[in-house]
Amino acid sequence: MMKPFRIAVAVMAIALAGPLAAQDGEPQAGGTLNVVIQPEPPGLMIGLIQNGPTQMVAGEIYESLLRYDFDLTPHPQLAESWEISEDGKTYTFKLRDGVTFHDGKPFTSDDVKFSMDVFLRESHSRTRTYMEHVESIDTPDPLTVVFHLKQPFGPFIGIFEPGTAPMVPKHIYEGTDFATNPANNTPIGTGPFKFDEWVKGSYIHLVKNENYYIEGKPYVDDVYYHVIPDAASRAVAYETGKVDVLPGGAVENFDVPRIRDMENTCITDKGWEFFGPLSWIWINMNNKPLDDLKVRQAMMHALDREFAKDALWNGLGKVATGPLSSSTRFYAGDTPDISYDPVKAKALLADSSYNGETIRLLGLPYGETWQRWAEAVKQNLTEIGMKVEIVPSDVAGWNQKVSDRDFDLAFTYLYQYGDPALGVSRTYMGNNAAPGSPWNNVSNYQNPETDKMFNEAAEMAKPEDRRAAYKTIQDQIVADVPNLWLLELGLPTIYRCNIKNPVNTALGVNDGFRDVWIDKK
Amino acid sequence: MKDFWKRFRYNRGAVIGLVILAIVIATAIAAPFIFPQSPWKMVQRPFLPPFTQGGLPLGTDALGRDVLSGLAHGAYVSLLVGLVSTIVALAIGVPVGAFAGYFVGRTDDALMRFTEFFQTIPSFALAIVLLAIFQPSLTYVIIAIAVVSWPPVARLVRGEVLSLRTREFVEAATLSGLGNVQIILRHILPNALPSIIVLASLMVAQAILLESSLSFLGLGDPNIMSWGYMIGAARTVIRTAWWLSFLPGMAILLTVLALNLIGEGLNDALNPRLTRKSE
């Protein structure tokens, strides 16, 4: 782990060969990359739209100031170096010289200020909440940007990725209505690939940015993102050679072993560290007897999550140990034990206020894997003596029931965005529990102490202090079992082995194609 | 009765059908005793092929559940759904058809237009819509199947009643002062019964198929192990574990076939004149 205060004074040199690249062999230029995109994105202007497929394509067109490796350590991207002041309130970024947008206009500190202060504050709800910590942005010269924060905000250094803080061209958007600007259809960024063509329902074509600021990169000539709406057809598209890269989630879990065993096929579950998708079961603590800690502990120990990982997720992913994904900053592995122990679970249940009530379990309507998972959980709970009924639903019904808190147990999974202050506290803060949203503190976990610590930990300047605070928070939350944590989802990227290095950052294929090359042997 | 059995036995297929159905019924009744554990219990490692492990002759499914136990418990669900939904459909269809056929005129028009309203919507699509509106539970699955399968009953009964109501014995009953309802119940319906029984046996088969199709699509009761569910859940692994779809598929095929054969046999036995004509 890098000591963050060393970064504060260190000035990092421009690394020509990406520091993240784990390359094998000498990169070769040329070739076409064929990737699956699912579903078809509604648009590619990432400052306006941030759903998954948009991020996947636009992350190659737009860039942010930094780039994150698998440990979420920041590396230079548009910023060649940066400094964080001792009090954690001033962030100074030095930009690379000679960077141009795809239309040839230079990228300067004005664009950074415009993007962060104007564009994203207006159009990006998540970034807007982060920017509330920023007092002002100075641009003393075209290659220097200074963020002045109102108070220290620990996660700040972790937000400069293309999905959260994309750099948009000021000269195109200033003074226009962002949402209706015709330029949204032909996105202009600084990234390694330029937008070429989008045939709706068929494919999106990006071509190499010849004027990219890193000599020799990108290696491949162009990228096709193929729109294939049916999961089985996506698997077949790989098998027949139409596409060469299947991003995580592109094919159903049960197809993974078959495709994985094909010749010249590689698989990795890396590239999700920034999102850290963690699955769990909400426990509706408004309902009796789920307000009883012993019932919740009994349920936690009843779940055979190792089995679910092997039988349903092909052994990919990790069994969760608590509210943080192990790839999220300040993860603590040594929290109270919540492993599978049916004997202990039975004893806890016998000792609790559970009296044979029927527990309604709401599965996640995302296909077979989740359906089987609900059945397995039901069986686990039945075996310790609980009565469980699976409630079927579609996506709209699931949203409605979870928003209305009309369930006892409900499956879900959420992204963590690399930092507990960004993607974890929202799930456990007492003041974020109002019904009406399926993404907030749905369980209605109320603990003023962890609330207070969450607030403090977000604003601590020193990472060591934050780590200590989050350790206490994790211990406390795991002891209280407000949710049944399941797995850190392993969403495998499958690709032909002669495509080298497609996943080289914590965002995976979202921003990784800068360093991809194709071995033509 | 003796004649009935003789005529029924004359149809070899019907006897075979009866044997198969008897086995299915026996399995359904015996399931809770032979397999006292829940069919959802995960007993072994997943995807165990058939005949490889003692105690699990038909292997295990994607979650390591005993396939044989699932088939046995599924038999009960299929028969239950088939019988109950047919009874409910008859309870709607027979009165509607009887009144329409007996009273003719406006009553007939009104009831038949109402019936046609249901007939114009494809029955499977209607069942899906009904289950999408209600929660897919066993009760609603039965109701949905009954609601989509009563119109043929109504039409059949109407036809029978139309032809029977002008017979002499009905006129005699009218002259002797019997009320309309009495005449329908005591004199007309008993004579229409043979056709209704034949249709009902086929409707049970139809209902089993419908339930399986709905469960296959994930619209069945998720808390109940049925054959359709087993196929639906195994569909995704058909390339690697074909037996998981094949075995419940065979169970459905045999049961539905048996019911159809029995229906044919019943037809022979109950409508002997029709049979002779076709020979």
Image (tube, grey):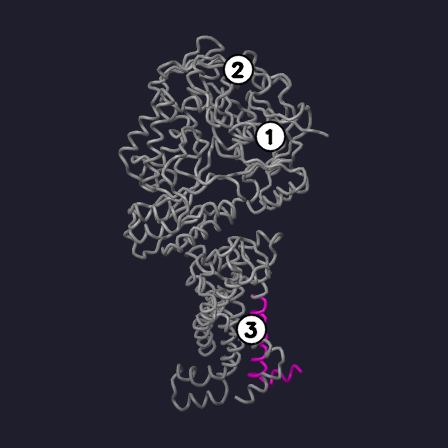
Residue A496: image quadrant is: top right
**Residue A502: assigned label:** 1
User: Which label sits in the foreground, 1 or 2?
Assistant: 1
Alpha carbons under labels 1 and 2: distance apart: 27 Å
Type of the residue with mark 3: Leu
Q: Residue furthest top?
A: A141
Task: Tell me the SS state at disc 3.
Answer: helix
Q: Which is more toward the observer, A263 or A502?
A: A263
Residue A27: image quadrant is: top right
Q: Chain of mark 3?
A: B
Pointer 3 local density, CA inside 10 Å: few below 14, some 14–19, many at least 20: many
Residue B99 sits in quarter = bottom left
Amino acid beneath label 1: Pro
Q: Which residue is mark 3?
A: B259
Residue A49 visible, this orientation: no
Q: Are marks 1 and 2 in contact (CB under 8 Å)?
A: no
| Chain part drawn in magenta | B252-279
> SS of the residue at dot 1?
loop
| In the depicted structure, whether residue A207 falls above or below residue A482 | above
Q: Is residue A260 visible?
A: yes
